[in-house]
Amino acid sequence: MNLISLQFLVFCIALLVLYYLVPKRFQWWLLLLGSAVFFLLTGTPYTIIYLLISIVSAWLAGRYIQTQNNRRRKRAVFIAEIILNVGMLAALKYTNFLLSTTESLVNLFGANLSLGTVSWVSAIGISFYTLQVVGYLCDVYWGISQAQRNPFKFALFVSYFPQISSGPISRYHQLEELLFAGHGFDHKTVTFGLQRMLWGFFKKLVIAERLTAFVNSVYGAPHTYQGAYIWLGTVAFLIQLYADFSGNMDIVLGLSESLGIRLTENFRAPLFARNVQAFWQRWHITLGAWFKDYVMFPILRSRAWAKMGRRLKTRFGKNTARRIPAWLGMLVLWVGIGIWHGNGWQFIFQGLWFFCIIVLGQLCAPLFDTLRRKLCIREKSFIWHLFQSLRTCLLFAVGLVFFRAQSLNHAFGMLFSAVTVFNPGAIFSVQTLALLGGWENLRIVLPAIALLLFVDVLHARGNSLRAWAARQNIALRWVLYYALLFAVLLFGMYGGGYSPGEFIYGGF
Amino acid sequence: MDREQVLHRVNAVFRDIFDDDTLAITEENSAADIPDWDSLTHIALLAEIEECFGIRFSMKDVLGMQKVGNLLDIIVHHT
């Protein structure tokens, strides 16, 4: 079931009505039932077996870890359960990548090996729910959360339908109380949630979908579209991805909010970040936070890393002893985030790109600071912030070339062409205009992007547009709601033989 | 060791890590109040404090610290 479909809207409305009609103690049961129906309608039904294996094994392991006093046994079960879940994800997502890499490596030495491919069907949202399950197990093992006694409640935590296909990645101790407590109907909560869903549909249908054709053309034929086309295509992809993924999150968080369950925010006006590190703290927040807490921190706190730090301190001094282990831990984090995004070398390079940019940013920070002072620019001035934000967006967009390109070769080819082919006139050519869908497309999408940025500016300054709208008189309020609704209905790309694409992060 | 003494020694570690001799932390301070206090500095800070007080923080401690006050609670508990 696509989130952009009439079927999904009917499903949501029916569930919302039933949710507030049933007694509060049965609400979570209804959500569990709804999650099962959503999963069966969205993916290939038999892939529910992967989900069930994760749920049952993690629930049993959590209970065992909680009740077992023997530390060795506890640790053994914890590690075995992590291996089972991560192994299942790795087998389903990365087997073909491993086979093709092995094949290429062996064939480098003159062999003629052909390992073929496997065609396992991956379960919907496996990349997201596996991280939730691993996070839960770590929290129980570390004593942060109590293991859930009820297997059905645990099943709801793992499979909660608004977030299962695209996140955000929730922590058990943050979601537990909200999921299982009953929620009475609250007009403000429900309308705020529905408004947010509408804003998500606007981002997806009016912005992301209207940029899809152009991005697909540039990235589909990198030999034809070179130089300025690649710059323009990449900037368009940054906006498309942002509108698509944050729109997806608005629908998910809005739907959940209307059920009285507030999920963790996944975006916080990232386009206004001043450096790439800060950008990632505002973009797909729950993924970065997950890798930081459950991968990087345990590595940095490990005995091996501490030993490395001590040795470096003796030989090279305190500063090096602090920096090198920290950067190595960060390297593991970025390679992990890269691999999580897909099964190809381009994704690993995407992670490496962000790692290098962040480390270089840390090293060059004093240089930039000196330069700014010599140019007599105040740190908090608008012009400096604008420069930093544009620089950050550009560096992030370059990383996205690896994410969007069909292969690592294509990505490098496109980056090479972007810096060696000088054809700025192509940006204003008739061909580019045609690829962008002509003025009839641009006169809709450009104001829509401006509106998106305006709303982000308000959010970055801590203003809530929904709260502001709620304070207006009834006439103005409804004019605003209808304006947004009609903007989606009139300017959105859907219906009449047009099928909106899946959300970019929906297939993970 | 009383809380005031712990705060004094922790402050010395903060000054060393952030390379700022004028830094004076309070129990209410958090990562948001000190510009360079990011996740990597947080880990470096904890490692120095562990060495200074001869203690070892658990992962629960590491992930649960929201402000300097929480850090002091844990150190006082351990010492």
Image (cartoon, rainbow, N blue to C red):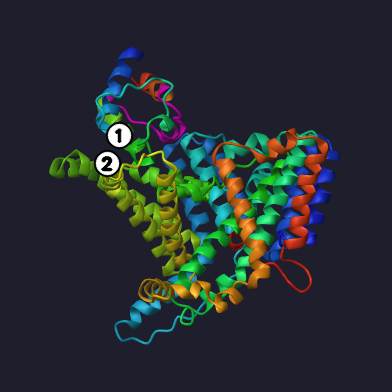
Residue A278 screen position, x and y as percent = 43, 46
Relative horizontal placement of residue A417, taking residue A189 as reference (left or right): left
> Height in image: A105 above or below B39?
below
Name the residue rendered at 61%, 46% in the picture: A455
Element at badge 1?
helix
For residue A306, the mark is 2
- Estimate the spatial distance between the alpha carbons at disc 2 and disc 1, rounded to whole Å: 8 Å
Few, some or many C-alpha atoms within 10 Å of disc 1 (few <14, some 14-19, many ≥20)?
some
Q: Position of residue A170 (x, y in %)?
A: 58, 44
Give the magenta part as a residue range: B53-69
Q: Examine the rendered structure and indicate whether residue A406 appears above or below residue A60.
A: below
Looking at the image, residue A315 sits to the left or right of residue B37; the answer is left
Q: Chain of mark 2?
A: A
Q: Position of residue A82 (x, y in %)?
A: 48, 51
Q: Nearer the viewer, residue A326 or A46?
A: A326
Eyeballing the image, is A2 above or below A380?
Answer: below
Q: Where, quadrant-wise, is the N terminus of chain A in this rendering?
A: bottom right
Which of these two is toward me, A159 or A439?
Answer: A439
Q: Is residue A410 magenta?
A: no
Given the image, on which type of amino acid does mark 1 rest? Ala
Chain assignment, label 1: B
Tell me where residue A195 appears, x and y as whole percent. 73, 45
Q: Residue furthest right?
A: A21
User: SS at mark 2?
Assistant: helix
Q: Is residue A260 above or below residue A122?
A: above
Tell me what residue is drawn at x 36 percent, y 50 percent: A330
Query: Looking at this view, is B41 or A67 the one in front?
Result: B41
Q: Residue B54 lies in magenta, yes or no? A: yes
The circle on residue B47 is: 1
The image quarter containing residue A372 is top left
Disc 2: CA contacts within 10 A as few (<14), some (14-19) or many (>=20) = some
Res. A50 in view: no
